[in-house]
Amino acid sequence: MRILLIFMAALLYSQQCHAIGGGGMGYRDGMFWGNDLNRDEYLSISEAKGIYNLGNPEVFAKYDKDSDGLLIKFEFYDYLAERTDNE
């Protein structure tokens, strides 16, 4: 029983320490990295098809500020912040 209590205390302590450091991803990062399938730190239009209407070429081009055919993380953040209901 004592070993179980020690184990539970250690587990609780490690989870609290992880939370203090900010451990997991937020919503925006999770959306970005969850769709960056080849892990190149960009979203292509084909990868963007899984995110609302971002796979629509017109919508994608609107947020592709440098017109390179890829969205960097910050262009994607702009999309999430500025998108309209039909985007």
Image (spheres, grey):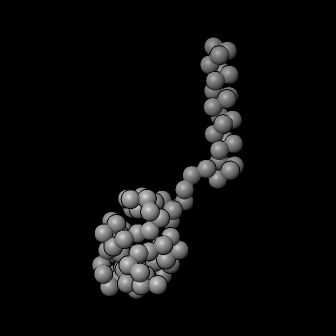
Percent coordinates x, y for residue 60 in the rendering: 37, 80
Q: Is residue 38 above or below residue 83?
A: above
Q: Quadrant of the N terminus?
A: top right
Q: Residue at x 42, y 84 (%)?
A: 67
The quadrant in which the C terminus is found is bottom left
The residue sitting at 36% across, 71% down in the picture is 44
| Residue 80 in view | no
**Is the residue 13 above or below the residue 75 in the image?**
above
Q: Residue furthest top?
A: 1
Apparent side of residue 46 relative to residue 3 in the rendered image (left or right):
left
**Residue 41 falls left or right of residue 51:** right
Residue at 37% x, 59% y is 37
User: Seen in the image, is 27 located left or right of residue 47?
Assistant: right
Task: Name which quarter of the figure residue 68 lies in.
Answer: bottom left
Specify whether 1 is left or right of 52: right
Where, by quadrant of the figure, is residue 47 drawn?
bottom left
Taking the image as drawn, is residue 10 in sight? Answer: yes
Foreground pick, 9 / 30? 30
Can you give x and y, in whole percent of width and height, for residue 14 in the image?
Answer: 66, 36
Compared with 63, 52 (above or below) is above
